[in-house]
Amino acid sequence: MALWIFLVNNAGICKLNKVLDFDRKDWDPMIDINLTAAFELSYEAAKFMIPQKSGKIVNICSLFSYLGGQWSPAYSATKHALAGFTKAYCDELGQYNIQVNGIAPGYYATEITTETRKNPETNQRVLDHIPANRWGETQDLMGAMVYLASRASNYVNGHLLVVDGGYLVR
C-alpha cells in the first residue's frame, strides 16, 4: 500500500451575486468544487492514512468561513461548511494520528479577486480593512502550509489558521 502523508484541498471557485440574483446553476458548481471535492479527496486519503496511523489534511478555507459574505452566498456557505468539515474530520481521524486543519486566507491577489482589485472603490475598501494595507500574495501562505505539513504541528488538530494581514481584527 502506498504511503499517503499529506493532502491539501485547495480547489475553489466564487461567483458574486446578490442573494435574489443567485440561482441553482450558480450554486451547484460551487458546492461541487469547494466542498464535495474536499470530501471525496479526504475520504480517499483517509483510506490510506487510517491503516498507516498517520497523515495530514489541510483544507483551504477562507475569511468567509467566519464572515457572512455579502454578494457571495454560496461561496460563504461552502467555506463555512468546509470549516465544519475540518473539525468533524479532526474529531474522527485524530485517534489515528491524522491531523486535519484549515488555512483561512484573507484577501489575496489571485484570479478570483481580479474584478474586486480592478475597481478602485472596492479595492480601497478592502485595503482600508487590512492593517497590513496590502493584498496578500500566494507566497504569504507558504509559512502556514509548511508549518501544517511539518512535525511542528503534530499536536495541532481541528484548527483554522487565519492568514489575512489582520483583516479580522478591524
Image (spheres, rainbow, N blue to C red):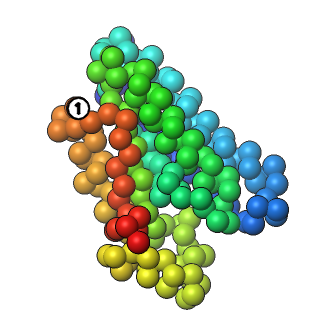
10 Å crowding of disc 1: few (<14), some (14-19), many (20+): few
Q: Position of residue 42 (x, y in %)?
A: 48, 29
Name which quarter of the figure residue 150 lies in: top left
Where is 132 relative to 74, above or below?
below
In this view, the residue farthest toward the bottom is 120
Mark 1 lies on residue: 155
Viewer can see residue 135: no
Where is 97 relative to 129, above or below?
above
Answer left or right for 23 relative to 121: right
Q: Position of residue 146 (x, y in %)?
A: 25, 47
Looking at the rendering, in which quadrant would you find the N terminus? top left
Answer left or right for 151 relative to 130: left
Q: Position of residue 169 (x, y in %)?
A: 37, 67
- Residue drawn 80% across and 51% down? 25
Looking at the rendering, in which quadrant would you find the C terminus? bottom left
Where is 156 relative to 45, above or below?
below
- Count of number-bearing discs: 1
Disc 1 marks a residue whose amino acid type is Tyr
Answer left or right for 113 relative to 31: left
Callout 1: SS:
loop
Viewer can see residue 106: yes
Name which quarter of the figure residue 96 lies in: top left
In this view, the residue farthest toward the front is 170
Q: Position of residue 50 (x, y in %)?
A: 37, 15
The front one of 55 and 86 is 86
- Residue drawn 60% across and 46% down? 78
- Residue drawn 34% across and 68% down? 165
